[in-house]
Image (tube, grey):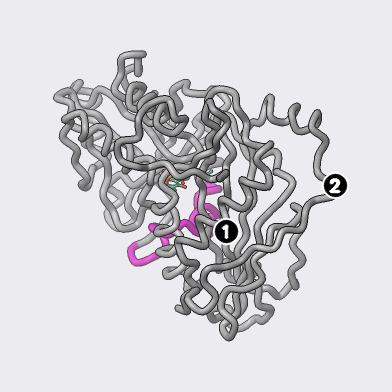
């Protein structure tokens, strides 16, 4: 598809929000942000057309988008998104984590959805723009962050099925506490045996709304069984573990080996990649390979698998206490304070919040 080369680097016009929230109201929201409930005063908007490339980069007051009912995103779901956090450090500076990796994944998602590529420079600049104008929205209490949601949609109005010639890119921001209401309390997950999230050659590796739409019904099934996430198997053999609706899965073996599913239909998580790197730095053997459901079941039963956890930007790292399915339940060992799960989680968040050195150069400053 077309690249941003003709307009790069973009210049962003700022229109300040005259109706920005009062300090007191914002502080109330920041004191208990939850996840994805509140939005900051501004948003980024950039337009793209086949003829003009990327243009009209702007930071605008947060507010509704005006789209024609025939905009093709509503009909054919030509859409992609990212999730990335801004972290306040103790000295008041604001940083993000591996934005180049999110930019690369956004470009891969764009290619799969026949959307135009936004350069990594413009992607990262858009994050800086919103954080600079809404810096007062970055929460500072423990384990909180400003969750940034860049997304791209097909805005052209027509009903034929083809890639749109008009596209919008936006970034909105939302102060975030824990994704799960129980914080780092272990979660139970439900094995979806009737539904797949992605198929061979489909869009599973792209971060696109359709994958999440496909996960909603099985996710409801999970809730009905008292579970907070759903685990999908591969859709070809229904034998191998893929991932959760919004997180990757990692298994820890007794001998310290760490195993995570490899598949071309799952999202390549940046949290997972970082956790595996930190584990490898500590000398753990790390394996990315196919993992069958049976391996999980028998491994936990025999004691060979000693920890199971889920990870992702929103959820960070959460121990999986139990895997439930029709007629079975596999209870994992409890992830105690000395568990690898919690110690890798602490190492990762210490880097993200600037409490420990960043040996891999993962942090990028956003507010300066
Ligand atoms: N898998 C899915 C389906 C996700 O939605 C996410 C969250 O972004 C992940 C995995 C984890 O990816 P990351 O760690 O990059 O957030
Ligand atoms: C993220 O972790 O950033 C995601 O996009 C997952 C979503 C379930 C919130």
Q: Secondary structure at mark 2?
A: loop
Magenta-colored stretch includes residue 204: yes
What's the magenta region? 200-217
Q: Nearer the viewer, residue 90 or 98?
A: 90
Residue 294, horizontal then vertical, whole percent: 23, 37
Q: Nearer the viewer, residue 141 or 189?
A: 141
Residue highlighted by disc 1: 151
Magenta-colored stretch includes residue 339: no
State which tag comes first along the sequence, 2 or 1.
2
Q: Residues within 10 Å of mark 1 (few under 14, many from 20)?
A: many
Residue 316, horizontal then vertical, whole percent: 45, 34
Residue highlighted by disc 2: 19
**Which numbered tag is attached to residue 66?**
none
Above or below: residue 196 compared with residue 109: above
Above or below: residue 137 compared with residue 55: above
Asked which quadrant contains residue 60, the reply is bottom right
């Amino acid at each position: 598809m077309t690249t941003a080369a003709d307009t790069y680097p973009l210049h962003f016009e700022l229109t300040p929000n005259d109706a920005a929230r009062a300090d007191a109201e914002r502080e109330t929201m920041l004191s208990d942000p939850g996840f994805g409930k509140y939005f900051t005063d501004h948003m980024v908007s950039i337009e793209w057309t086949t003829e003009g490339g990327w243009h009209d980069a702007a930071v605008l007051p947060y507010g509704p988008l005006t789209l024609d009912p025939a905009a093709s995103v509503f009909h054919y779901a030509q859409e992609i998104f990212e999730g990335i956090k801004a972290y306040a450090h103790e000295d008041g500076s604001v940083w993000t984590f591996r934005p180049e990796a999110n930019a690369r994944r956004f470009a891969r998602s764009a290619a799969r959805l026949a959307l135009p590529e936004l350069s990594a420079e413009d992607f990262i600049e858009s994050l800086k723009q919103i954080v600079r104008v809404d810096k007062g929205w970055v929460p500072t209490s423990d384990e909180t962050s400003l969750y940034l949601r860049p997304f791209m949609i097909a805005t052209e109005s027509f009903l034929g099925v083809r890639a749109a010639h008009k596209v919008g890119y936006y970034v909105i921001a939302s102060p975030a506490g824990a994704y799960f209401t129980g914080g780092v309390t272990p979660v139970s997950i439900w094995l979806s045996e009737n539904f797949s999230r992605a198929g061979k050659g489909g869009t599973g590796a792209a971060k696109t709304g359709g994958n999440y739409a496909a996960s909603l019904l099985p996710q409801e099934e999970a809730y009905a069984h008292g579970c907070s996430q759903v685990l999908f198997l591969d859709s070809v053999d229904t034998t191998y573990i893929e991932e959760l609706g919004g997180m990757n899965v990692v298994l820890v073996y007794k001998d310290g080996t760490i195993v995570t599913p490899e598949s071309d239909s799952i999202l390549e998580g940046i949290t997972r990649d970082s956790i595996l790197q930190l584990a490898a730095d500590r000398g753990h053997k790390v394996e990315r390979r196919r993992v069958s459901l049976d391996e999980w079941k028998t491994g936990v039963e025999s004691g060979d698998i000693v920890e199971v956890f889920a990870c992702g930007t929103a959820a960070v790292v959460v121990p999986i206490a139990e895997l439930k399915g029709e007629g079975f339940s596999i209870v994992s060992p409890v992830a105690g304070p000395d568990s690898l799960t919690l110690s890798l989680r602490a190492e990762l968040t210490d880097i993200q919040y600037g409490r420990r050195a960043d040996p891999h150069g993962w942090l990028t400053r956003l507010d300066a």
